[in-house]
Image (cartoon, helix red, strand yellow):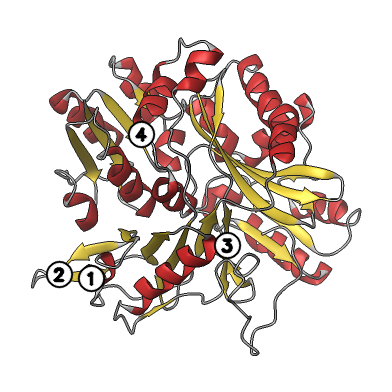
Amino acid sequence: MNILIIGSGGREHALAWKISQSPLVDTVWSAPGSPGMNEIGPCFDLKANDIEGLCQLVSQLEPDLIVVGPEQPLADGLADRIRGMGFDVFGPSAAAARIEASKGFSKDLMAKYGVPTAAYQRVTNFEAASKFLDTLEAPYVLKADGLAAGKGVVIAKTRQDADIAAKSMLAGQFGDASAELVIEEFMTGEEASVFVLTDGTNAVLLPAAQDHKRAYEGDKGPNTGGMGAYAPAPVMTDELTQQILETIIEPTLAGMRAEGCPFQGVLYVGLMMTDEGPKVVEYNCRFGDPECQVLMMGLEGDIVPIILASSTGGYSATDFARLAPGGGFQPAATVVMATKGYPDDYPKGSTLNGVTTANRLEGVKVFHAGTDIDADGGLMAVGGRVLNVTAKGQTLDQAFQRAYSGVNAINWPEGFYRRDIGWRVRTDFEMPADVETDEPGEA
């Protein structure tokens, strides 16, 4: 098989790396790819949102499968276009991608089909926002309805902050994405991310992961696309997994079918373990980033058969389940190295040294999230989140030890990272005295 990966981030690098290990796969192409992905197979200089260019590339390459990594091209209908050309695609239709592309759509779906989630209201003006905020207690959760690169969520600790955030968002803080807001009650508990590989009817669950959205240690600072992650998440017991399958995943997939937009691909379900049981924080229509990195690192078996089955459908529940990756899962962790200034404005073009050294460490793999090659042939940072230093081990503690050893091997003065990724599960870690941890809750 020849497989084309759409995207250039750490998620796509991890997918390309894992897929290339399959005995079923001959060549892995990427568009646009990255320096790291170029080491796996040829890259083509086409942006992930260049729908016409990517369709032309598919016609030229005739891949056996196209894997779409980012959410934006899915929301823009890339999977529909490629399927219409007669090719198999791992990724949902534009109609199904609304489960992420519109927070309002997803909340209405949950309400209609009885999926547990926070109380909410959709608003398009400040008067309506203020009226609903009057019914809630601090803190307050405000979400841009549309796609905002993982940054369209504001947790306001006071009503004054909530009012300021609502006015700013509705005035265009996140462009058209925040022309409509979803305002929610704040949920308290421990978070987990569940990833469901599905053909629209059948489902296989991958190990649950936990990520860290806030930019700074102690889970403080603005929301980001994710500063680190680990799997498996100890909070996810077998009993809890079964409960989530029955009360959340199955009703969600059934609801999507009933709405005429069955979901094919990977469904990310962000969960909060509340005192009332698990509730949905959000859905994503693709792998989480950086959760994908730890899942691909930890999975021992071949991921390609279940990805292909999710793309084509037509399997019985038993046959679909048999295609799940075998061989078990080894604990894995990733630490994001980001450019100073992220998630706000940040410089580009700083030099990255030591990545090759980090990759030589036992159990360590550095996935490129925002890199390019400079004029001298060296590696440079061109993104906010730049490197995902990922490792696996016999235990989570060992996975984190290896990941941070990889971080320490990299020389990049212009970058920063969190020292406390996985603080809930690391038995050898004590929070630095200068860091105060926020109360657990929705992030």
Label 2 with label 3: CB-CB less than 8 Å: no
Name the secondary structure under disc 3.
loop
Q: Residue furthest right?
A: 135
Residue on which disc 3 sits: 213
**Which residue shows up at 68% across the image and 38% down it?**
104
Quadrant placement of the N terminus: top left
**On the image, numbered disc 1 is attached to which residue?**
380
Badge nearest the viewer, 2 or 3:
3
**Amino acid type, mark 2:** Asp
How far apart marks 2 and 1 lie (CA) works out to 6 Å
In primary-sequence order, the first of circles 2 and 4 is 4
For the residues labelled 4 and 3, the Cα–Cα distance comes to 29 Å
**Residues at marks 4 and 3 touching, judged by CB atoms closer than 8 Å:** no
Q: Is residue 273 left or right of residue 175?
A: right
Residue count near mark 3 (Cα–Cα under 10 Å), binned few <14, some 14–19, many ≥20: many
Rendered location of residue 331, percent (x, y):
49, 54
